[in-house]
Amino acid sequence: MPMEKTAIRVRGLEKSYGTLEVLRGVDFDVEPGSIFALLGSNGAGKTTVVKILSTLLKADAGTASVNDFDVATQAENVRESISLTGQFAAVDEILTGRENLVLVARLRHLEDPGAIADDLLRRFSLTDAATRRVSTYSGGMRRRLDIAMSLIGNSPVIFLDEPTAGLDPEARIEVWHTVKELAGDGTTVLLTTQYLDEAEQLADRIAILHEGRIIVNGTLAELKQLLPPANVEYVEKQPTLEEIFLAVIGTNTRKQG
C-alpha cells in the first residue's frame, strides 16, 4: 500500500543544550489541511520543535520533513513551503502597518502588494491604523500585524508559535477565526500553545508535549476517552481538556530549567 501523505512527519527528534535534554524522541504526523496543536507548559520544548521544523535549528538526532522535504537536507525547499510566526512580533516599527505588509508581499514577488495589504488590514481590523507607524501600536495590534504578515503568499504550511499570547479576548477570537479559515482553504497549520481552550477550539488533533516527549496524541474525543466521564446526579460529565492535561502529565513531575 502507498504511504499516506503527510504535511509534516517527525520521527525521533532529539535536542539537548549541554546536559539539558529538551527533546527526547518526539514523533508525530500532521495531515494536510488540518490544524495540529502542540500543547505543553513553558519549557516543554514546543518552540524547539518549531525551530527545527522551520530550519532555524538543527536536531541532534531524528528526522523531520515538511511538505515532503527533509528539514536537514532540503532546507531551502522547506523554507519556500512555510510561513512562521514566532512568539514575538517580527515587525518593522519604523514602517507603518500597511508598509510592513506591502514590503513582505514585494519580497515574495506577488502581484498587487497594495491590494494584498489592504485585504489583510481589513481581516485583522487594522485598517484605521494602516498609516500609523508600528511603534505606536499596542502589543495586541503588533501581534495581529505579525500574524497577517505570515499569511502573505499562501504557504501550504504555517507554523504559529503561541499565536495569541498577549492578545485580548476579542483579538484571540479573531485570530482563531482566521486560523480556521486557513485550514478550510487547505493550509496545514501547526500551532503551539499553552492555552487549553485554544487547543480545544481549534485543533483537529492535539499532542501534549511534556518533559521532551509526546505523551498523548489524538483528537479531542480520543483524549477524552483517557478519563472516564463523571456522573453527577445521573448527568454524564465529560472530562475537560484541562483535566486530561493535568492527569497525563502527572502531579509529581520534575522541573526543567
Image (spheres, rainbow, N blue to C red):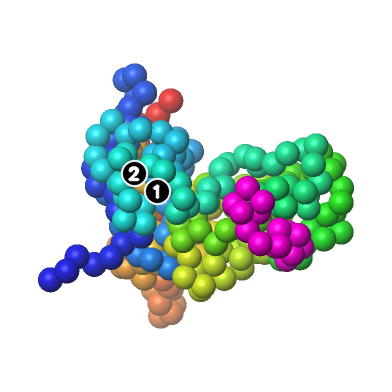
Q: Name the residue under label 1.
A: 77
The amino acid beneath tag 1 is Asn
**Apparent side of residue 149 relative to residue 243 in the rendered image (left or right):** right
**Apparent side of residue 59 relative to residue 144 in the rendered image (left or right):** left
Q: Is residue 108 magenta?
A: yes
153 and 142: which one is in front? 153
Cα distance in 3D space between marks 2 and 1: 6 Å
Q: Is mark 1 on a helix, strand or loop?
A: helix
Q: In which quarter of the image is residue 109?
A: bottom right
Pick out the residue farthest to the top: 18
118 and 221: which one is in front? 118
Residue 221 in sight from this viewpoint: yes
Q: Is mark 2 on a helix, strand or loop?
A: loop
Quadrant where the C terminus lies? top left
**Which residue corresponds to the image point at 36% horizontal and 60% vertical from the top-left?**
7
Q: Position of residue 228 (x, y in %)?
A: 32, 67
Q: Name the residue under label 2.
A: 74
Q: Where is residue 254 in the image (x, y as percent from the top left)?
A: 35, 31
Quadrant where the N terminus lies? bottom left
89 and 1: which one is in front? 1
**Which residue corresponds to the image point at 31% horizontal and 62% vertical from the top-left?**
6
The amino acid beneath tag 2 is Gln
**Which residue corresponds to the image point at 42% horizontal and 66% vertical from the top-left?**
34
Q: What stretch is highlighted in magenta?
A: 105-119
| Mark 2 vs 1: CB contact within 8 A | yes
Q: Where is residue 38 in the image (x, y as percent from the top left)?
A: 42, 52
Q: Is the residue marked by circle 2 packed among few (<14), some (14-19), or many (20+) residues within 10 Å? A: some
